[in-house]
């Protein structure tokens, strides 16, 4: 790279944004990717320009019992067909609380010295008093960066709202919409047909609880992110001149309630209820969802994206994606 190019990148002002995902779905997705053979063997783990000492981090393949070769030697490069239990049991698994760790400033937390402590299971709780000081420091660092360093972010559960916030925050228009929009596909949402969502429905409640326990920091971070996401979304909507008053009036009402009682429950019910229902797909429930405020608002925003130049995903593409994921999952779970 030339000196001029280096100087140009050195002086550039970077804007950071991200998409957060449901922690359990994200963990299952990484497990699925790993059991297909992904190892990130060529990637280097760095912090403060140094790799972590072996005593602080060891690849999980050192602890996997079911990856022995014919001579009984542990295969350190291939996690093919790793079981969920082995994936959960590895004390150095970087998949544990990955979103929290990647958002935190590790250079101020002694890098990977406390990796195994960050991964310690935490039972079902929403109280910060139940987690260790080391875990709390990691969580607080991630929250701080989410508020002050990351310019804006989206949530994969709410793709229409996420596209709206990112476009407003970054002053851009995405060439392709995040979601194909019609009545059927919107009710079901694309995330319901991800590999992880299909696999999740086949896992026992005991396994799902273990996944939640080793990703407790991610869950607490996601809860915090949802509240901040709701606050920012309402702020953008209330000051958006393109939004009709029949959408703004209910928002003003619940916004006043939020300020008076410091509760975002009415806001969340208004904006997010009836968007996703995994268990109920009967026609009566569908009719109720189609008349809900959240559905009508998402419909309006999607048409707004199209008017500004975003191209919706073709329904045939969505159907083909769903078919491909189902076939891939059936193939992967044969072993």
Image (spheres, rainbow, N blue to C red):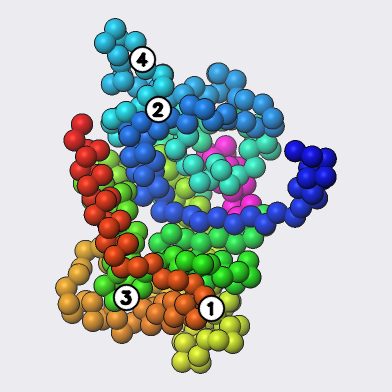
Secondary structure under the numbered disc 4 in the rendered image: loop
Mark seen at residue 90: 2
Q: Is residue 251 left or right of residue 202?
A: right
Q: Of the residues tagged 2 and 3, which is closer to the observer? A: 3
Quarter-wise, where is residue 35 in the image?
top left
Question: Which element is circle 3 on?
Answer: loop
Q: Secondary structure at mark 1?
A: loop
Q: Which residue is mark 4?
A: 74
Image quadrant assignment for residue 90: top left
Asked whether the beta carbons under mark 2 and mark 3 sit within 8 Å of each other, the answer is no
Q: Residue furthest top?
A: 71
Q: Nearer the viewer, mark 1 or mark 3?
A: 1
> Can residue 264 be seen in this snapshot?
no
Disc number lying in front (1 or 2): 1
Task: Give the foreground label among 3 and 4.
Answer: 3
Q: Nearer the viewer, residue 9 or 204?
A: 9
| Mark sitting earlier along the chain (1/4) | 4
Sooner in the amino-acid sequence: mark 1 or mark 3? 3
Residue 144 vertical placement versus 287 (above, below): above
User: Which quadrant, please, contains the N terminus?
Assistant: top right
User: Image quadrant of residue 280?
Assistant: bottom left
In the rendered image, residue 142 lying in the magenta stretch gets the answer yes
| Residue 78 appears in view | yes
Bounds of the magenta segment: 132-146
Name the residue tied to disc 3: 182
Mark 1 nearby-residue class (10 Å; few <14, some 14–19, many ≥20): few
Q: Which residue position is annotated with label 1? A: 308
Q: Quadrant of the C terminus?
A: top left
Which of disc 3 and disc 2 is earlier in sequence? 2
Q: Residue at x 45, y 71 (%)?
A: 311
* Residue positioned 52% across, 86% down in the render: 243
């Amino acid at each position: 790279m030339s000196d001029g190019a280096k100087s140009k990148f050195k002086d550039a002002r970077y804007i950071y944004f991200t998409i957060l995902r449901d922690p359990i779905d994200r963990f299952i997705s990484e497990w699925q990717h790993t059991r297909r053979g992904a190892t990130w063997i060529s990637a280097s783990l760095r912090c403060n320009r140094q790799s972590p000492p072996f005593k602080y981090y060891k690849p999980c393949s050192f602890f996997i019992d079911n990856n022995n070769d014919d001579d009984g030697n542990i295969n350190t490069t291939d996690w093919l067909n790793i079981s969920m239990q082995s994936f959960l049991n590895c004390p150095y698994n970087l998949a544990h609380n990955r979103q929290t760790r990647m958002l935190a400033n590790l250079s101020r937390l002694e890098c990977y010295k406390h990796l195994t402590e960050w991964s310690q299971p935490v039972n079902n709780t929403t109280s910060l008093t139940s987690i260790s000081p080391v875990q709390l420091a990691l969580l607080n660092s991630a929250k701080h960066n989410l508020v002050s360093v990351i310019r804006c972010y989206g949530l994969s559960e709410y793709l229409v709202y996420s596209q709206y916030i990112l476009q407003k925050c970054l002053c851009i228009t995405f060439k392709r919409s995040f979601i194909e929009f019609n009545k059927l596909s919107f009710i079901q949402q694309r995330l319901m047909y991800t590999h992880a969502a299909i696999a999740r429905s086949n896992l026992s409640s005991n396994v799902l609880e273990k996944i939640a326990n080793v990703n407790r920091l991610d869950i607490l971070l996601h809860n915090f992110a949802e509240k901040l996401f709701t606050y920012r979304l309402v702020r953008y909507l209330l000051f958006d001149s393109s939004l009709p008053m029949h959408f703004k009036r209910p928002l003003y009402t619940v916004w006043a309630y939020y300020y008076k009682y410091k509760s975002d429950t009415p806001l969340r019910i208004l904006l997010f209820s009836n968007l996703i229902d995994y268990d109920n797909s009967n026609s009566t429930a569908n009719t109720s969802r189609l008349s809900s405020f959240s559905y009508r608002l998402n419909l309006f925003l999607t048409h707004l994206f199209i008017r500004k130049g975003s191209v919706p995903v073709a329904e045939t593409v969505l159907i083909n994606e769903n078919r491909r994921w189902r076939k891939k999952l059936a193939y992967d779970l044969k072993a």
